[in-house]
Amino acid sequence: MPYLVQGSIDDHTLAVTAATAQEAFAKAIEWQVAQKFTDVSIYDGIKVYSIDAFSLAMALLEIAKTVEATAEPALKAKEK
């Protein structure tokens, strides 16, 4: 799923598409920290996130995947 990173600098809005969440997050951080963009956001096709909200959403997704992966062997063992 492509991600759209958008930010403003010198009263101009720029946007770039990233193929992965990791690439989008890296570009957003680069723009905000190194290049002093303002209003940097990441759009995932459904919702627009600030950098901190996007990092939280991705962290929660990784936690959910880890819990699910950990639970699957336990559920299979119970079925036997």
Image: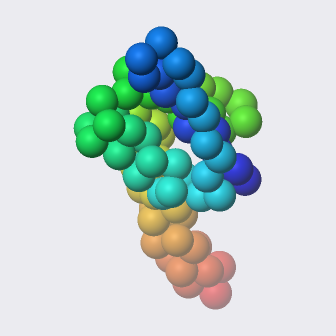
Q: Is residue 12 left or right of residue 32?
A: right
Evaluate whether residue 38 shows in this view: yes
Q: Residue at x 48, y 57 (%)?
A: 22
Q: Is residue 72 left or right of residue 62?
A: right
Evaluate whether residue 29 shows in this view: no
Given residues 2 and 10, the one toward you in this image is 10
Q: Residue at x 35, y 45 (%)?
A: 30
How far from the left and from the top, in percent, is residue 31?
Answer: 38, 38
Given residues 1 and 17, the one toward you in this image is 17
How far from the left and from the top, in percent, is residue 33?
Answer: 26, 38
For residue 52, which quarter of the picture? top left
Given residues 61 and 19, the one toward you in this image is 19
The tally of labels here is: 0
**In which quadrant will I find the C terminus?**
bottom right
Which residue extends farthest bottom?
80
How far from the left and from the top, in percent, is residue 63?
Answer: 42, 55
Which residue extends farthest top?
11
Q: Is residue 40 left or right of residue 17?
A: left
How far from the left and from the top, in percent, is residue 78?
Answer: 57, 78
Question: By what rule are the colours in the image chosen?
Answer: rainbow
**18 lies above or below 70:** above
**75 lies above or below 51:** below
For residue 5, which quarter of the picture? top right
Given residues 65 and 33, the one toward you in this image is 33
Q: Residue at x 32, y 37 (%)?
A: 35
